[in-house]
Amino acid sequence: TSDPLMKKLKEKKKHAKGRCATCRWLDICAGNFRVRSEAVTGDAWAPDPACYLTDEEIA
């Protein structure tokens, strides 16, 4: 696709930030819902604010 946002969404694990970027479960959830991150933080690539995992669980 030529749309930059669509390209990033297809490879969203590469663009994950914060705790998502180093989470051992990233291959399973792929950073979860980008629209929720965008709505809450203003950054589509910020960690999903609804992630229920503790820091110990993602390490």
Image (cartoon, rainbow, N blue to C red):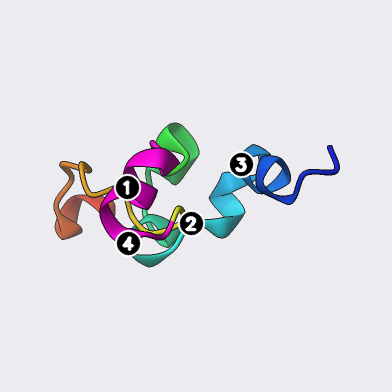
Residue drawn at 30 percent across, 59 percent down: 41
Q: N-terminal of the two: label 4 or label 3?
A: 3
Q: Quadrant of the N terminus?
A: top right
Q: Which residue is mark 2?
A: 16
Residue drawn at 55 percent across, 48 percent down: 13
Q: N-terminal of the two: label 3 or label 2?
A: 3
Structural crowding at the residue carrying mark 1, measured as other residues with C-alpha within 10 Å and reported as few (<14), some (14–19) or many (≥20): few
Contact, CB < 8 Å: mark 2 with mark 1?
Answer: no
Contact, CB < 8 Å: mark 3 with mark 2?
Answer: no
Amino acid at the residue labelled 1: Ala
Specify start and end residues of the magenta stretch as a single range.
33-43
Using residue 17 as the reference point, say whether residue 57 is left or right of it.
Answer: left
Contact, CB < 8 Å: mark 2 with mark 4?
Answer: no
Q: Answer whether residue 59 is visible to the viewer in this image.
A: no
Where disc 3 sits, the SS reads helix
Q: Which residue is mark 3?
A: 9
Q: Nearer the viewer, residue 47 or 23?
A: 47
Where disc 1 sits, the SS reads helix
Q: CA distance from mark 1 to mark 4?
A: 18 Å
Q: Vertically, is 28 above or below 56?
A: above
Which of pointers 3 and 2 indicates the residue nearer the eye? 3
Label disc, if present, on residue 11 of the rendered structure = none
Amino acid at the residue labelled 4: Arg
Dividing the picture into quadrants, the one containing residue 35 is top left
